[in-house]
Amino acid sequence: MKKTVIMNNTYLLLGGNLGERFTLIEKAKNLLREKLGSIIKASSFYETEPWGFEADKNFLNQVILVETGHSAEKVLDICLSIETELGRERKSDSYSSRTMDIDILFFNDEVIKSKDLTVPHPKLHQRRFTLEPLAEIASGYFHPALKKTILELLQQCKDDSEVKKL
């Protein structure tokens, strides 16, 4: 008998401000396809100011929707390994410039709070650089904890940093 794989939908935010930003995001997407699953949707690219710290170079961000047979914890492991493979160095818990950052924004409509993983991403509703690309591909998606759509969260977001669609 063939084992049925339950498919999960996860929204991921890809971004970085070091190195060849477009190339690194494309490499990340290729690795995610190889290790995680199919990319169903992808937002435009957005250039954004650093959030929570000062940096010389702006970030390039993109949100993607991936269909995967993996658990949320396995998705986290894969994302962390891809960040490392693409040159990310974690020096401390504070924000810093990086070649690649992959955040799990949503995993299905689950609310997950464990030692290593919090989903939905706990700061996504505070960050215009996350909400703008997410609203482009999922404006009506309902945040399972905040009980609002992405468009509502974007309209209520107090973050006034510049987010430029490319």
Image (cartoon, rainbow, N blue to C red):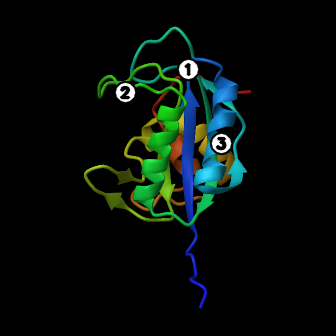
According to the picture, the residue beneath numbered tag 2 turns out to be: 90
Residue 27 visible somewhere in the drawing:
yes
Q: Is residue 27 left or right of residue 81?
A: right
Question: Hey, what amino acid is under mark 2?
Answer: Arg
Q: Is residue 108 left or right of residue 22?
A: left
**Dot placed on the residue nearer the N-terminal end, 3 or 1:** 1
Mark 2 or 1, which is nearer the eye? 2
Question: Hey, what amino acid is under mark 3?
Answer: Lys
Q: Residue 89 placed where, x, y %?
A: 41, 25
Query: In terms of secondary structure, where does tag 2 sit?
Result: loop
Query: In terms of secondary structure, where does tag 1 sit?
Result: loop
Q: Is residue 53 positioned above or below 101 on the image?
A: above
Q: Residues within 10 Å of mark 3 (few under 14, many from 20)?
A: many
Distance in Å between CA atoms under marks 3 and 2: 21 Å
Q: Residue 64 placed where, x, y %?
A: 63, 47
According to the picture, the residue beneath numbered tag 1 turns out to be: 17
Question: Hey, what amino acid is under mark 1?
Answer: Asn
Question: Looking at the image, do the residues carrying marks 3 and 2 touch, with CB atoms under 8 Å apart?
Answer: no
At 43% from the left and 49% from the top, the residue drawn is 77
Disc assigned to residue 47: none
Q: Residue 84 placed where, x, y %?
A: 47, 33
Distance in Å between CA atoms under marks 2 and 1: 14 Å
Q: Residue furthest bottom?
A: 1
Kindly indicate the quadrant of the structure image that contains residue 145.
bottom left
Q: Residue 63 placed where, x, y %?
A: 61, 43
Residue 128 visible somewhere in the drawing:
no
Q: Is residue 101 positioned above or below 120 on the image?
A: above
Q: Quadrant of the N terminus?
A: bottom right
Question: Looking at the image, do the residues carrying marks 3 and 1 touch, with CB atoms under 8 Å apart?
Answer: no
At 28% from the left and 56% from the top, the residue drawn is 114
**Dot placed on the residue nearer the N-terminal end, 3 or 2:** 3
